[in-house]
Amino acid sequence: MARFGKAFVFGCVTLAVSGLGFLPARWMYREAAFQSAIGKYSRELTPGMERQAVEDQLSSDRSAWRQDFDSDIIDLGDEVRFVPFCGPTRVYVEVAFQTRNRSAPYPDDVLRSVKLLRQPSGCM
């Protein structure tokens, strides 16, 4: 019986350690996907483009995006971080515009920058 208990504990420890080795590889794969997405949008959407052309491009790509007053936000997904008492971090691409009016977006607003945003969620 004692032999079975030691083998069980050894098996659990081995499984836990091998699982921890998998997590950094998963994080690196996900980070590479985020960097690939920001690279794609940075190549396609160049500073100086008008908002209407940018939004037409995003719609033709079937990207899930939402419009804000001075930016368009493209949701890329969750990033799992191993920080105690925190939930996943939402990752977005922000397409920022130089606007004429802060109260409403206009089709002739000019693209200023494309950048990656991370928004932590659920931290206590």
Image: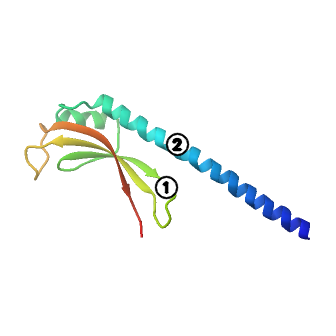
CA neighbours of label 1 inside 10 A, class few (<14), some (14 to 19), many (20+): some
Question: In the structure shown, which secondary structural element does the residue marked by tag 2 occupy?
Answer: helix
Is residue 3 rendered to the left or right of residue 86? right
Is residue 34 rendered to the left or right of residue 15? left
Residue 59 drawn at (x, y percent): 29, 37
Gap in Å between the C-alphas at discs 1 and 2?
A: 11 Å
Nearest the camera: 33 or 10?
A: 10
Task: Give the residue drawn at x 42%, y 38%.
Answer: 35
Is residue 15 rendered to the left or right of residue 106? right
Amino acid type at circle 2 is Met
Give the quarter of the figure containing the C terminus.
Answer: bottom left
Amino acid type at circle 1 is Arg
Q: Which residue matches tag 1?
A: 81
Task: Give the residue drawn at x 33%, y 34%.
Answer: 41
Residue 16 drawn at (x, y percent): 69, 57
Task: Give the residue drawn at x 18%, y 47%.
Answer: 70
Nearest the camera: 2 or 72?
A: 2
Q: Which residue matches tag 2?
A: 28
Whether residues under marks 1 and 2 lie with C-beta atoms below 8 angstroms apart, the answer is: no
Give the quarter of the figure containing the N terminus.
Answer: bottom right
Nearest the camera: 2 or 94?
A: 2
**Sequence-wise first label, 1 or 2:** 2
Residue 101 drawn at (x, y percent): 8, 48
Figure disc tally: 2
Question: In the structure shown, which secondary structural element does the residue marked by tag 1 occupy?
Answer: loop
CA neighbours of label 2 inside 10 A, class few (<14), some (14 to 19), many (20+): few
